[in-house]
Image (spheres, helix red, strand yellow):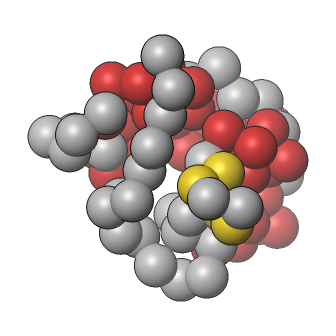
Amino acid sequence: MMTQLVKMAQVFGEDVACREMRKHACAYFKGIPNGSKIRQKVTSCNTVSQYREALQVRGRVAGFDGSNSASGFVFSS
């Protein structure tokens, strides 16, 4: 997911890419455990760095290494 966001930001600019990624992020995290918490976090992101922060999982950014796996997402309430 982060790879897609970074590429979109290079082509369309960060502002447009972040707004567009909100739709994609909701689809990526639909039907997974804690998906609603993840969607809440990413729908408020306005920059690539905010997406990186929102998707921090155990010290690394999920999806940034080319993996779109959502397993391992752990969010505290």
Image location of residue 18, percent across then percent down: 68, 40
Residue sitting at x 85%, y 47%: 49
33 lies left or right of 41: left
Q: Is residue 35 visible?
A: yes
Image location of residue 44, percent across then percent down: 65, 20
In the rendered image, the vertical position of residue 49 relative to residue 54, given as above or below:
below
**Front residue of this view, candidates 37 and 58:** 58
Residue sitting at x 31%, y 35%: 35
Q: Image quarter for residue 6? A: bottom right
**Front residue of this view, candidates 10 and 52:** 52
4 lies left or right of 25: right
Extreme-bottom residue of the structure: 66
Image location of residue 55, percent across then percent down: 61, 48
In the rendered image, the vertical position of residue 32 relative to residue 60, given as above or below:
above
**Front residue of this view, candidates 21 and 33:** 33
In the rendered image, the vertical position of residue 50 relative to residue 48, given as above or below:
above
Q: Is residue 17 visible?
A: no
Residue sitting at x 51%, y 26%: 76
Residue sitting at x 70%, y 29%: 45
In the rendered image, the vertical position of residue 54 relative to residue 52, given as above or below:
above
Image location of residue 58, percent across then percent down: 62, 59
43 lies left or right of 48: left
